[in-house]
Image: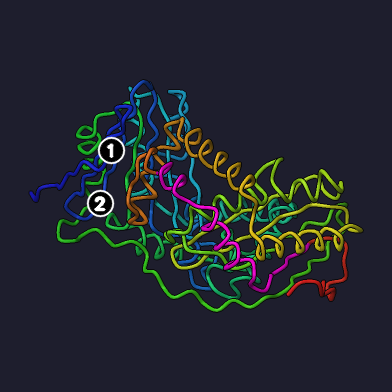
Amino acid sequence: MPKAQTRTLLREGDGGLVRRTTLPGGLRVITEQVPGVRSVAFGVWVNVGSRDETGTQMGSAHYLEHLLFKGTHKRSALDISASIEAVGGDLNAFTTKEYTCYYARVLDVDLPLAIDVVCDVVTDALIRTEDVEGERGVILEEIAMHEDDPTDVVHDDFAAVMFGDTPLGRPVLGTIETISGISRRSINAFYRRTYRPESMVIAAAGNLDHDTVVRQVRAAFQSVLDPSVEARAARTVRRPRAHEAGVSVTKRPTEQAHLVLGVPGITRSDPRRYALSILSTALGGGMSSRLFQEVREKRGLAYSVYSYAQGYSDDGMFGVYVGCLPAKVDTVLDVCLTQLQAVADHGLTDEEILRGKGQVRGGTVLGQEDTGARMTRIAKSELHDDPLLSIDGLLAHVDAVTPEDVRSIAHDLLTAPATLAVIGPFDETTTFNTVG
């Protein structure tokens, strides 16, 4: 039998140890031993998301996430959930535009059970016709629930304008039309084509032994590993498409107007991402941020206002969300555009940047205080083929960002024509001419 290849990737100063083994057949297993805890987070990460669908397949990746919990040859749907809940664990999954994750968090003594259950779900799903039909109604209800929440829908509308009719511009859940039309044959073919061991990363963090995890994972994947196959590379990075400014207005009889104002961003591997994180935090990341102070504290125009950045393998976006009374939208837009222009022209103050750095530093450390977050960090690093940095290494990158770095990326991004998505009681022909 071909030998597995194991490397030590990181030794943390607090005793943490990160190791990776690539099994024959391309399956990668990465673990972090976390001292002082009695839990383990275990996940199977699949390098497939909604952007890997064609237009008629829209929603397949998320549909499949549901179906994998409906039963295997070894377990019924009840067996799958009850086995983890019986030991006090959590079992769940989520789908994004670029990957899907199935995970469990359990006591350390129950890790073998979690490995067996999660791997069984991912490798041996039945995808029966009756399950496809039964879950179709559940997903249509989920879409309806999503559509009832304008704070969610406005982000989908923004992505649709920003990325156009491309996979990144389409909703992860799909639409009522596409979900209603997906067949069992189509979704099963999607499963068989994309859920290959060489496209997966197995990640675990907590009180564990790496070699033991590897043995258990290898046993769980034994029937699907093909020793002749090598690990598949991370998603191909393509040249970002040209973005055009635009406005989307969705008429809804809501009490609040919901808007996202934004510009094209940067990829998740762009070295400027640390500067962008500080910019976003200082601009709209907390109660002391500039937008919170200008929009809420000084003028009382909104309850919720924040900024965010999202990076993909080959594209990205930066946006500002505000929820306000419909009568205040023009004023809110004017304040936001004025502040974005001011930051583009003159940058943030040194005090704002210093405060933003402190928030990013604290968030980086505090966000890694549980095994689930640590499992996610090592999994994404491996899945995206990004260098795995220690916490101290991440903090060093944040500390190395200069005020000029932040001002430079602010100018690069915020001088671009803006895109706007609005949901509220407006005529859908409203153009909000202040944008662009």
The magenta segment: 394-422
Left or right? Give the position of 137 relative to 337: left
Looking at the picture, does residue 115 appear above or below residue 379?
above
Looking at the picture, does residue 68 appear above or below residue 319?
above
Which is more toward the observer, 63 or 235?
235
Residue 332's quadrant in the figure? bottom right
Rounded to the nearest angstrom, the CA distance separating label 1 from label 2 is 17 Å
Is disc 1 in contact with disc 2, using a CB cutoff of under 8 Å?
A: no
Mark 2 falls on what kind of element? loop
Count of residue discs:
2
Q: Residue shown at 47%/35% (left/top)? A: 365
Q: Residue shown at 15%/61% (left/top)? A: 228
**Which three-letter amino acid code belongs to the residue tagged 1?**
Val
Q: Residue shown at 42%/48% (left/top)? A: 397
Q: Is residue 38 magenta?
A: no
Q: Position of residue 101 (x, y in %)?
A: 43, 48
- Dot label at residue 27: 2
Q: Magenta-highlighted stretch: main secondary structure?
A: helix
Left or right? Give the position of 196 relative to 186: left
Q: Quadrant of the C terminus?
A: bottom right
**Which three-letter amino acid code belongs to the residue tagged 2?**
Leu
Q: Position of residue 110 (x, y in %)?
A: 35, 25
Residue 9's quadrant in the figure? top left
Q: Position of residue 90 (x, y in %)?
A: 48, 32
Which is more toward the observer, 276 or 268?
276
Looking at the picture, does residue 212 appear above or below residue 354?
above
Q: Is residue 396 magenta?
A: yes
Q: Position of residue 292 (x, y in %)?
A: 74, 47
- Dot label at residue 18: 1
Left or right? Give the position of 72 relative to 173: left
